[in-house]
Amino acid sequence: MSENLKNGNSASRDQAAVMKLDLQCVKNNADHRTNEITVERLIIRRGQAFSLILSADRLDPNDIEITVQTGPGACEQKGTLSTCSTKPQRCSDAAKRWSVKVLSGSSSSVTLSILCPPDACVGLYSLSARSGSSSCESAVTVLFNPWCKDDWVFLPNEAERQEYVMNEQGIVYKGVDEYITNMSWDFGQFEEDILNICLKLLDLNTKCLKDAAEDYSARCNPIYVSRVVSAMINSDDDRGVLMGKWDGSFVGGVVPSNWSSSVDILRRWFKFDCYPVKFGQCWVFAAVMCTVLRCLGIPCRVVTNFESAHDTDQNLVVDEYFSDYGVRPKLNQDSVWNYHVWVEGWMRRPDLSQDSFYDGWQVLDPTPQEKSSGTYCCGPAPVKAILEGHTDVKYDVPFVFGEVNADKITWLVMANGSKKNILSDTNAVGQHISTKAVGSNNRQDITDQYKHKEGSAKERAVYDEAVKRVTDLKASETPSPSVHMKVSLEGAPLNGADIRLKLLLKSDNTKAQDLTLKMSAQVMRYTGNPAAGVWNHTTDVQLQPKTEQTLPFTVPFSAYGPNLLDNNCIKVSVIATDKSDSKEAYLAEKDVVPHSPTLKVTVSGSPLQDSEMTAEVVFENPLPTPLKNCSMTLTGSGLLKQTEQSNTMELGPGQRITLKVTFKPYRLGPKKLVANFDSSTFKDIKSSVDVNVRPATSRLGFLSFSR
C-alpha cells in the first residue's frame, strides 16, 4: 500500500476523470470513538457504518462500486477482500461482505454510508471507489468494536467499556498478599503512533511471516489475535517487544521496575528496527499487552495474583524446598511467586461451546514461562473454566488453574540429601487476585471469579475435578502437624530501619518438647527464588504442652539493606526440629516488604486543554547516610509528549531532589502523571497525580492527588 494511502489521502487513478474522496475523518472517528488517536486518517470500528463523500465532474449515484482489501493475496474466500455497489446485483456474496448505500447525491457529489461487517478482519485496508471512468483510492483502519452486539468482543456495560477500552491510565498491583502495593501505569493506547506500532507487531508475528494471507484472514477472530499478541509481547521465540530478565545485571537495558509507561517501550521497540527492548518482568509484559489489546479494540484489564504458583509439570502441585536456613535453590522448576501479573481480555468463546458458558473474561499471559503449542504464549483461558476446574479446555487452563489453586508441598532437605514432607498446604496459593476497579482508583478483589472459597467443599470438589481431567494422580492429603508456628510483624516495616517480628509457637502435644529454632532472612526475587541470605540465628526453646509461647526477634537494616532488590521482598523463615527426634520438623515463613519513603507529586495551573500547567516532583532523603545515583522521571499520555527526566545526583541526609516540568495538556478527559524516583538504595519509588483535562472554554477543572 502506498505511503499516501497510509496517511489517509485520496488518490485518483484516472487524471482525465478526477474523483475526490472526503473520508470525513473528524466526524467518523468521533462516531467510532477513535478520534482520541487522530482525526487525520480514517479509523473505524467494525459492525458500525461510516460515511464518505465522493465528488467528480460526473457521477451516477446508482453506479458506484466500493472495494476494500487488506493484506497480501486478498480474496473474498479469506474475507480479506469485499466489493459492494449501489447496484445490489453487483455486490459480492462473501461472508464478510461490506455494504454501501446512498444517503444523498447529485451528478457531481454523492454521500455514501458504508457498513463494515462485525466479523471483518482488523487492520489497515485500501478502500477504492469507482464510478464510470472515475476512480480514487484511500485507506481505512478497522478495529474491534466492543459497542457492537454482533462483535465477539461486545461488552454490554458502558462504564466497563470506558475503563477497559478507553482509559489510557491504570494501576498495577505488586507486593505480597499481606502488603499489597500499587503503581500507576501509563497505557497510552491512543498516542497517535501506537496504532501503527500495534499493526507492525501483528505483521511480525511468526504465523504472518510464514503465511501472511492466512494470518490476515484470521485477524477477524479476537481469540486468534489475542493469542498472537500474547506471543509477540515477549521475544523468546520471535521479534517480540520485550526481553525478560529476572536476575543478575541489567546493564545494557532498563531495570524492569523503572518502567511506568507502555508508550516508551513500544516506541523504543519500533524505533530500533523492532529489536527487543531490555528488560521486562511480568507486570511490564502484562501492561504492554493491555495497551496493545485496548488499542486494537479488545477490552482488557491487568490482573495480579498473589502467592502465584508456577507449576511446570501441570500436575496442580508445586514443591517448595527448605534447608536449615531458609529456601534453597530449586530441585525442580516449580515455584510460588510473591505475585504474578497477567491480563484478561473480554470475548466470546464459540469455539468451546454452543452456549455462552465460556464467554467473558479470558486469561492471557505474555510473560514467557511455558510454551503453548510450541510458542511462548498463554491463553486465552476462560476464567469460568478455571473457576469450575475444566482443565481440558483450550487454551492453557491447567497452567492458569495451577497458578491460582495448586496445592503446595513443602520439603525439608536433610544434610544427607534426603527430604521430608513437613507441610502440605491447600490454601496458600492464589490470594487476593486483584484488578483496578471500574471508574475509580480502588482495588477490586476478583478471587471469587477464579475459585470458590478456600477450604469449602465446593473448592475441594473443583480441585479434584481439575486434577482428574489432567492427571491420574489423586489430590494431595494434608498432614496435621502437632506444633503450630506463625511469624508476624511488630509494627509496619520501614525501609531503612530494623524489622521487628515475633514468633508464635503452640503445641498440641501432651508432653513438653525441646526444640531447636533455626531462624533466617533471605532477600528474594519475586519469582520465589532466593537472591541472598542476609541474617540467621539459632536458639533453643522448651515448648510446654497445650500452651502458646511468643519469641520476639529483629532483622537489622544493616543486614538486609545492602542486599535489597528492586521488589524489596524479604522471606523470614523458622525451621523447628525436635531435639529428641530430628525427623520431626516444623516450618513458619513470612514474606516482608519494607515500606518505601514518600515521593510527592503536585500540579498547579488550570487543567484546560492547551493551557500551561506545572508539575513538581520532590523526594527527600530520610536516611542518615547519602543516597547515590538519584534520579527522577515523569510521564503521562495526553499531558506530556515525552518522558521528562532529571539529572543523576547524590543526595545527602535530609536533602531534596526536585523535578519541575511545565506542560500543556493536549487531550481531554481524565489523565495521570506518573513519577518515578530511583537510587542505589531505594529502587523505583512511584507516585502519581490525576489531572482531569477540560476544554479550553471551561472555567472549571478538577485536580486530585494520589500516591
Image (spheres, rainbow, N blue to C red):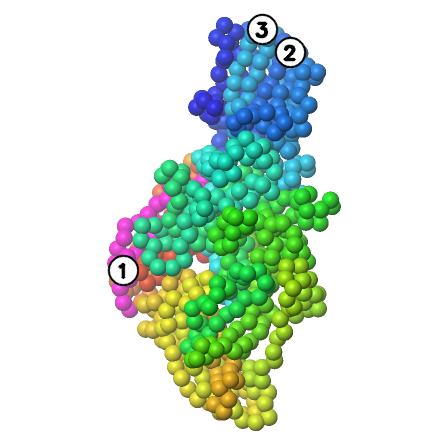
Q: Amino acid at mark 1?
A: Lys
Gap in angstroms between the C-alphas marked 2 and 3: 11 Å
Residue assigned mark 3:
58
| Frontmost residue, 277 versus 35 | 277
- Measuring 58% from the left and 28% from the top, which residue is drawn there? 80
Q: Is residue 656 left or right of residue 225?
A: left
Is residue 315 rendered magenta in the image? no
Q: Is residue 318 left or right of residue 103?
A: left
Gap in angstroms between the C-alphas marked 1 and 2: 73 Å
Q: Quadrant of residue 227?
A: top right
Residue assigned mark 1:
628
- Residue 657 drawn at (x, y percent): 30, 55
Residue assigned mark 2:
63
Give residue 207's mark.
Answer: none
| Callout 3 secondary element | loop
Query: Dot 2: within a 10 Å radius of its alpha carbon, few (fewer than 14), some, or many (20 or more) residues?
Result: some
| Frontmost residue, 43 versus 68 | 68
Q: Amino acid at mark 2?
A: Asp
Q: Quadrant of residue 64?
A: top right
User: Is residue 419 visible from the viewing direction of this image?
Assistant: yes
The magenta stretch is 624-650
- Residue 571 drawn at (x, y percent): 44, 71
Q: Is residue 446 left or right of residue 604?
A: right
Is residue 630 rendered magenta in the image? yes
Q: Is residue 282 above or below residue 207?
A: below
- Residue 515 drawn at (x, y percent): 48, 88
- Residue 649 drawn at (x, y percent): 26, 55
- Measuring 38% from the left and 57% from the top, which residue is drawn there? 684
Mark toward the start of the polypeptide (1 vs 2): 2
